[in-house]
Amino acid sequence: MVVKVLAVDLGATNGKIYEVELREKLTVRELKRFRTEGIFLPGRDRDHFLWNLPKFYEEIESVLETSDTQSVGVDTWGVDFALFDERGRLISLPYHYRDIRTEGVMEKVFDIIPKKYIFERTGIQFMEINTLYQLYSMVLSKDPFLKVAKKILMIPDVFNFWLSGEVVSEYTIASTSQCYSVPEKRWAFDLLEKLSIPTEIFPEVVSPGTVLGKCRVKREMNVIATTCHDTASAVVAVPFEEEGIYISSGTWFLVGTELEEPLLTEEAMERNFTNEGGYGKIRFLKNATGMWLLEECNRMWKKNYSEIVEMAENAPSFQAFLDPDREEFLHPGNMLERIRSYLEKTGQRTLGGIGEISRLIFESLAFNSKWIVEQIEELTGRRYEKIHIVGGAVKNDLLMSFIADATGKIVVAGPVDATPIGNALVQFIAMGEIKDLDEAREVVRKSFELKMFEPKNPELWSEKYEEWRRYKGMRV
Ligand code: LRH
């Protein structure tokens, strides 16, 4: 019998639904693609940046109705959540993590709970977008939604609930919240209590690969809680043959390695690394800005991706340097203007053309990747030969070669659809069709062509890296 599953993968710009079939090899077929970007809805004092979740559900439902797969699994971005009342009704459209409501909230939390304590309890890095700070911003603003909430569900948990009726949270997505203790494998209620966040709203946590039940839309189909965090799914599909570094590339660059146990040292905390839950492993990584900068610029340019890459290729190199992780680039807005003002503030020359700006972004992403890889090696005390890159940026040969040059390591690029592939692989393991993670990765190696990039000009890049370092974290 042929086994087929549906993998629903919602990202911060697109939602995609794939049918993944397992025979000797995997076959991936994209069935549907729709925009997921947040929407600004006017409020009394300001616009609120929200997710149009019911619309995404409608899109998923329409595919389920005509599908004949054995199961369905949903993965999405991390940290965001929705609140439900006692009748299981969605209380409001959930906030987008890039909404400004969490600005300055992290520091207010540190006034109550020491940073070190939070890191040791949760294992999670400090980002103002985390669920913990979103919830605390609601406590501070006495948000009535929080008062009537009976359950909190992370975004993929919402779809699992709507599709199966089960009210649970899946482990990998729960771990992104910073409300969950990765070392102890349970919600960190003591932290939440100190911040007056209601603890009774947190649901039971289940492991990735749990069969939740029959799908309400299509009874013949099972709903499986896969690795519901998109990055966790992507990491499952990294074709590792030995220990190594991965970059899951998309709006974000998640640069990390796999560990057996969380690394909770003060150094890991100071460098803002995270220990997110993975499929049987810990995802020790750093969240870095990825294609977000380019996506935001392209809202104005309106070019297709290959055109942009070609223009960048023809633009002169190392004209300026940029730190992609600066706070001023976090929220949506006029990114071209922000980059222009950043260059001016840091005393660099202004860049005008699409090619110049996109080259600046690609080079800086490559330098930033090197910076993170170096830290992973220092923190784990290991050396890695190769960097596996999966996800959307894999289509960009120029960027792949920049990363090889910047890091001086071999880049193995692919598969591009790692997230839905990982999502599907976890479903196949749950169904007993694939034995374990190692076998799943063997299937990936057999099924997809991987591209290798060797460093060509590491000396020049390492010289320029020193210049870039001056701008990383620069206070201006
Ligand atoms: C990537 C991602 C990342 C973070 C961010 C909010 O899509 O899931 O791992 O959690 O979104």
Image (cartoon, helix red, strand yellow):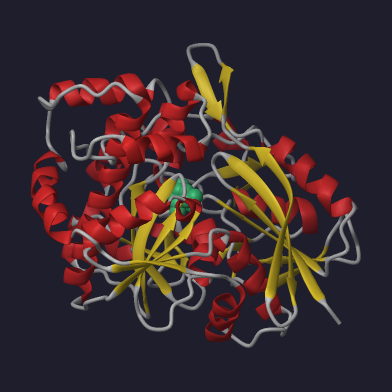
Q: Which residue is drawn at 52% across and 25% down?
A: 302
Is residue 188 among what the camera can see? no
Q: Where in the figure is residue 147, as x and y percent of width and height?
A: 57, 36
Q: Which residue lies furthest to the bottom in this view?
A: 435
Q: Position of 468 compared to 393: left or right?
A: left
Compared to residue 145, the image places residue 116 above or below, namely below
Compared to residue 67, the image places residue 359 above or below, namely above
Q: Where in the figure is residue 312, as x and y percent of width and height?
A: 35, 37
Q: Position of 1 compared to 294: left or right?
A: right
Question: Nearest the camera: 138 or 208?
Answer: 208
Is residue 451 among what the camera can see? yes
Compared to residue 109, the image places residue 262 above or below, namely below
Q: Which residue is drawn at 63% across and 88% down?
A: 435
Q: Residue furthest front?
A: 314
Q: Where in the figure is residue 367, as x and y percent of width and height?
A: 22, 50
Q: Where in the figure is residue 449, as x and y percent of width and height?
A: 54, 70
Q: Position of 30 compared to 250: left or right?
A: right
Question: Nearest the camera: 465 or 377?
Answer: 465
Q: Position of 199 compared to 382: left or right?
A: right
Compared to residue 238, the image places residue 302 above or below, namely above
Question: Nearest the camera: 133 or 309?
Answer: 309
Q: Which residue is drawn at 61% across and 66% down?
A: 421
Question: Nearest the camera: 447 or 328?
Answer: 447
Residue 227: image quadrant is bottom right
